[in-house]
């Protein structure tokens, strides 16, 4: 191929990628519906929309991480490499119907069930900072308050940051089925999410954010398959170490133990639906809030509180 043609082809490819990226962004922020994009692709095989892979289109939808996208493709019998404009007739119908059903669920009138979003990640990644930013800047978001057997840290208040309970009370909560999940964290204290307030909020149409550890997230996935699991990542391992050492709340032995735990936790990120890199607190918090979006006429809570494990 002549050099001039090669350069022109390269520029065209870059332009096409940019235009596809713009379509995905429009879907992600709600400017366009995924169904509209699919319909455009079906009607014009030469359009930008037709060049999108189905995985890219589905991945632009809020609450659909890589694992859930794979599950949808398997259900619809669509190959991951297929482009929207290249689907067969039956596949187009199945994708169109699935997108229509999803839009119907998200936009239905009345008080539908709220969305449960679970925020987890390795120690010192900044889960507490992100949840605190959400608590302070998004008062319509309900952050669940965890129960814990560890003693309060300076400035923590019972019922606001945690429900501080002793081992006997925690055992009773487990026995009576009052915990949505619970786990032993860092081989020390136990933490758990009280079930009644979460169920009450979800049933009233209020979305709930849980900030919990990896073990707890797995248990929530088992008990509430519809929950959206979000894994908060550090920009790098070096930054994670810097944050842990810099906060100065643990001794050297505890820091080493937590870093060992962090290595194990980072290896589990593929189990989650959505991965968010915490390199900017405001942006990371907004991405979490976006996942909590519910119909505009759904009920919203007046109070809020957060917890940090």
Image: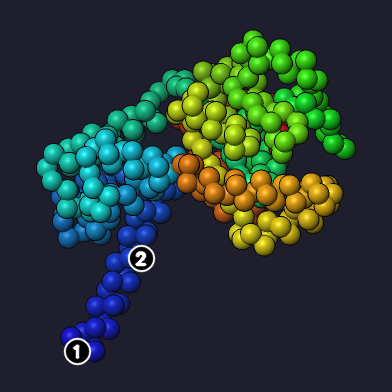
Name the quadrant containing residue 140.
Answer: top right
Up/down of 164 relative to 228, above or below: above
Instruction: Report whether 236 appears left or right of 72.
Output: right
Q: Is residue 107 left or right of residue 285?
A: left
Rendering coords of residue 169 (x, y %): 76, 15
Instruction: Say few, some or many: other residues with alpha carbon within 10 Å of mark 2 (under 14 / 14 to 19 / 20 or more).
Output: few
Q: Position of residue 103 (x, y in %)?
A: 34, 34
Q: Which residue is mark 2?
A: 18
The residue depicted at 51 percent of the width and 38 percent of the height is 229
Residue nearer the viewer, 41 or 57: 57
The reply to whether residue 83 is in sight is yes
SS of the residue under disc 2 = helix
Number of callouts: 2
Residue 117, position as x, y percentages in the image: 54, 34
Q: Which residue is mark 1?
A: 2
Quadrant where the C terminus sits is top right
As drawn, the residue found furthest toward the left would be 89
| Quadrant in which residue 61 is drawn | top left
Residue 55 numbered tag: none
Quadrant (top left/top right/bottom left/bottom right) for the N terminus: bottom left
Q: Residue at x 68, y 15 (%)?
A: 173
> Would you place residue 282 above or below residue 185 in this image?
below
Task: In this rendered view, identify the residue nearer to me: 23 or 255.
Answer: 255
For the residues labelled 2 and 1, the Cα–Cα distance comes to: 25 Å
Q: Secondary structure at mark 1?
A: loop
When the figure is inspected, residue 247 is found, relative to residue 6, above or below; the finding is above
């Amino acid at each position: 191929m002549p050099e001039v043609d090669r350069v022109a082809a390269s520029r065209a490819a870059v332009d096409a990628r940019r235009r596809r990226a713009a379509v995905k962004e429009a879907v992600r922020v709600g400017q366009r519906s995924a169904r509209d994009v699919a319909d455009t692709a079906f009607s014009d095989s030469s359009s930008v929309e037709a060049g999108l892979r189905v995985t890219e289109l589905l991945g632009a939808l809020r609450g659909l991480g890589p694992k859930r996208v794979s599950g949808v493709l398997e259900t619809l019998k669509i190959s991951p490499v297929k482009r929207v404009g290249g689907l067969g007739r039956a596949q187009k119908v199945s994708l169109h119907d699935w997108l229509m059903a999803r839009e119907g669920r998200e936009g239905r009138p009345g008080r539908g069930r709220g969305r449960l979003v679970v925020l987890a990640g390795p120690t010192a990644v900044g889960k507490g900072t992100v949840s605190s930013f959400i608590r302070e800047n998004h008062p319509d978001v309900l952050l669940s308050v965890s129960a814990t057997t560890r003693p309060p840290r300076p400035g923590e208040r019972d019922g606001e940051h945690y429900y501080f309970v002793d081992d006997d009370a925690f055992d009773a909560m487990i026995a009576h089925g009052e915990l949505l999940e619970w786990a032993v964290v860092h081989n020390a204290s136990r933490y758990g999410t009280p079930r009644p307030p979460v169920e009450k909020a979800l049933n009233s149409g209020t979305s709930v954010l849980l900030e919990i550890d990896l073990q707890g997230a797995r248990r929530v996935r088992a008990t509430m398959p519809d929950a959206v699991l979000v894994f908060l990542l550090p920009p790098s391992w070096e930054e994670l170490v810097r944050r842990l050492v810099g906060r100065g709340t643990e001794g050297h032995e505890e820091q080493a133990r937590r870093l060992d735990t962090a290595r194990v936790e980072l290896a589990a990120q593929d189990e989650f639906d959505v991965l968010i890199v915490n390199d900017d607190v405001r942006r990371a918090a907004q991405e979490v809030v976006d996942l909590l979006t519910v119909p505009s006429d759904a009920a919203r809570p007046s109070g809020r509180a957060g917890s940090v494990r």
